[in-house]
């Protein structure tokens, strides 16, 4: 069999896409390799959220292009969000690339492979306004060996935040059919996965676009929860104002749905949020987060924040720091603002924040994040919690298992036995900034 290597960058949605591409290629004479130099087919699945990710992708294929000089039969594919955004420009920049595959057309991969093996160069980046469920059921998904299976339930985004490239790379929101999702969930459970994570750019808007049925995320959660066996259910990422009381209530009532909400705030200042085209202000986000904390015992709420958005003042940035603290957020992804082509904010050049200021603000944001994480973890010392074990490793001569609680806290436990995939009861004995320590009960 020929060997294929896929370098996956960015979010869990990209990781899910890579698993699907591996599955398709396994039907056409390819097997996965972890060593790029041994591959007959090299693919990079790109992320365009920040310029750094895009630059990293171009640097990687530049290296692969050099390998092609001594291995002329090597095939190179440029896939994902940057491919969808830049399309045929990529051939001009890197003429050694054999095919460009956007996010909308991943199920064209088998036909693409046939064409490039016949000497063609192929670009498949047309936008579609439909899901590819009919194509999805034709191929197995070659999931990364893990306890957690990522399953996309929506594609695209309708929000058009002024900083975000996703609507231009993933298209408008499209909900996958419940039957297709349930089949993938059952297949994953039958393969031994113990946790199901439902994915979407705005996962809680699932079903809004259905014309023939009234079926939303809460309904999907109920159907998955009813499946037999012991497993967990998570869903990410949630848009604040799409979180309904029904969804929160459903999450509480269903025993397999975890006490975890990832809800990007992006800024703690209402004027900045308005400039970002977010559909809420500081007060509304606080209202939603506090409601979840009140309704869901032991809930973990995580978020995303941007430092140095165009026009952001020091006072407005201070509002972000205070929001993170006052909300007692358990963890936050942080980043300095990066202008992205086609977005509205990228045109506000006169409002750009100096790079040194952005870097300094990001450092303060990260420090506040560390404080919040440690304070959150300290609350659980002395508690008994269920942990799903994900890894077994040796650290400095000591065997350690690690996993996650239902509310997504990472726990490290000294143990000489590999318990990966098992649910164990643990007493939390200590807290660090990014994880808890515990012992098996």
Image (spheres, rainbow, N blue to C red):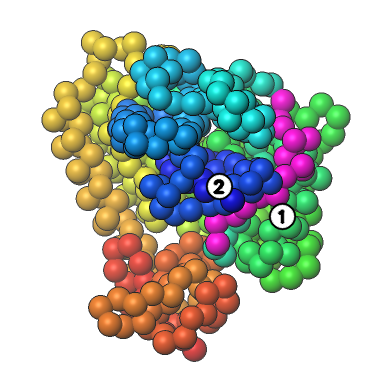
Q: Is residue 227 left or right of residue 335?
A: right
- Give the distance between the C-alpha atoms of the residues marked 2 and 1, in whole angstroms: 29 Å
Q: Quadrant of residue 364?
A: top left
Q: Secondary structure at mark 1?
A: helix
Percent coordinates x, y for residue 342 in the rendering: 43, 14
| Front residue of this view, candidates 250 and 173 | 173
| Front residue of this view, candidates 286 and 121 | 121
Percent coordinates x, y for residue 84 in the rendering: 51, 23
Q: Main secondary structure of the magenta part?
A: loop
| Residue sitting at x 21%, y 22% | 353
| 164 in the magenta segment | no
Q: Quadrant of residue 233?
A: bottom right
| Residue sitting at x 70%, y 49% | 140
| Front residue of this view, candidates 198 and 302 | 198
- State the residue position of label 2: 2
* Depicted 129 relative to depicted 438: above or below: above
- State the residue position of label 1: 185
* Depicted 180 relative to depicted 254: above or below: above
Q: Secondary structure at mark 2?
A: strand
Label 2: few (<14), some (14–19) or many (≥20) C-alpha neighbours in 10 Å? some
| Front residue of this view, candidates 218 and 438 | 438
Q: Which residues are magenta?
A: 130-145
Q: Is residue 85 left or right of residue 207?
A: left
């Amino acid at each position: 069999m020929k060997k294929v290597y896929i370098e996956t960058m960015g979010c869990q949605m990209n990781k899910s896409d890579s698993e699907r591409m591996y599955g398709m290629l396994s039907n056409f004479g390819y097997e996965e390799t972890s060593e790029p130099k041994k591959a007959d087919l090299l693919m990079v699945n790109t992320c365009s959220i920040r310029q750094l990710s895009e630059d990293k992708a171009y640097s990687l294929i530049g290296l692969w292009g050099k390998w092609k000089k001594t291995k002329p039969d090597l095939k190179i594919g440029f896939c994902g969000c940057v491919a969808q955004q830049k399309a045929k420009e990529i051939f001009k920049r890197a003429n050694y690339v054999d095919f460009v595959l956007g996010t909308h057309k991943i199920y064209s991969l088998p036909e693409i492979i046939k064409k490039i093996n016949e000497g063609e160069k192929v670009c498949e980046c047309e936008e579609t306004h439909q899901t590819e469920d009919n194509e999805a059921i034709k191929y197995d998904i070659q999931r990364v060996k893990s306890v957690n299976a990522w399953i996309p339930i929506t594609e695209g985004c309708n929000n058009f935040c002024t900083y975000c490239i996703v609507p231009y790379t993933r298209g408008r929101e499209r909900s996958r059919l419940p039957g297709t999702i349930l089949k993938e969930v059952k297949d994953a459970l039958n393969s031994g996965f113990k946790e199901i994570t439902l994915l979407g750019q705005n996962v809680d808007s699932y079903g809004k676009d259905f014309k023939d049925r009234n079926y939303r995320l809460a309904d999907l959660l109920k159907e998955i929860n009813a499946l037999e066996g012991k497993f967990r259910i998570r869903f990410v990422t949630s848009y604040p104002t799409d979180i309904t009381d029904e969804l929160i209530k459903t999450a509480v009532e269903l025993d397999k749905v975890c006490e975890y909400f990832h809800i990007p705030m992006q800024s703690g200042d209402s004027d900045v949020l308005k400039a970002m085209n977010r559909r809420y202000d500081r007060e509304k986000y606080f209202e939603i987060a506090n409601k979840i904390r009140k309704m869901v015992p032991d809930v973990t709420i995580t978020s995303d924040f941007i430092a140095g958005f165009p026009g952001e003042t020091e006072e407005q940035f201070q509002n972000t720091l205070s929001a993170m603290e006052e909300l007692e957020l358990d963890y936050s992804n942080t980043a300095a603002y990066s202008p992205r082509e086609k977005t509205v904010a990228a045109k506000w050049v006169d409002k750009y924040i100096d790079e040194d200021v952005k870097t300094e603000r990001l450092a303060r944001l990260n420090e506040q994040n560390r404080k919040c994480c440690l304070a959150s973890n300290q609350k659980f010392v002395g508690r008994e919690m269920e942990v799903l074990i994900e890894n077994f490793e040796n650290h400095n001569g000591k065997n350690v298992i690690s996993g996650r609680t239902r509310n997504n806290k990472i726990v490290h436990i000294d143990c000489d036995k590999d318990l990966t995939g098992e649910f164990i009861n643990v007493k939390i004995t200590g807290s660090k900034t990014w994880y808890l320590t515990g012992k098996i009960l």
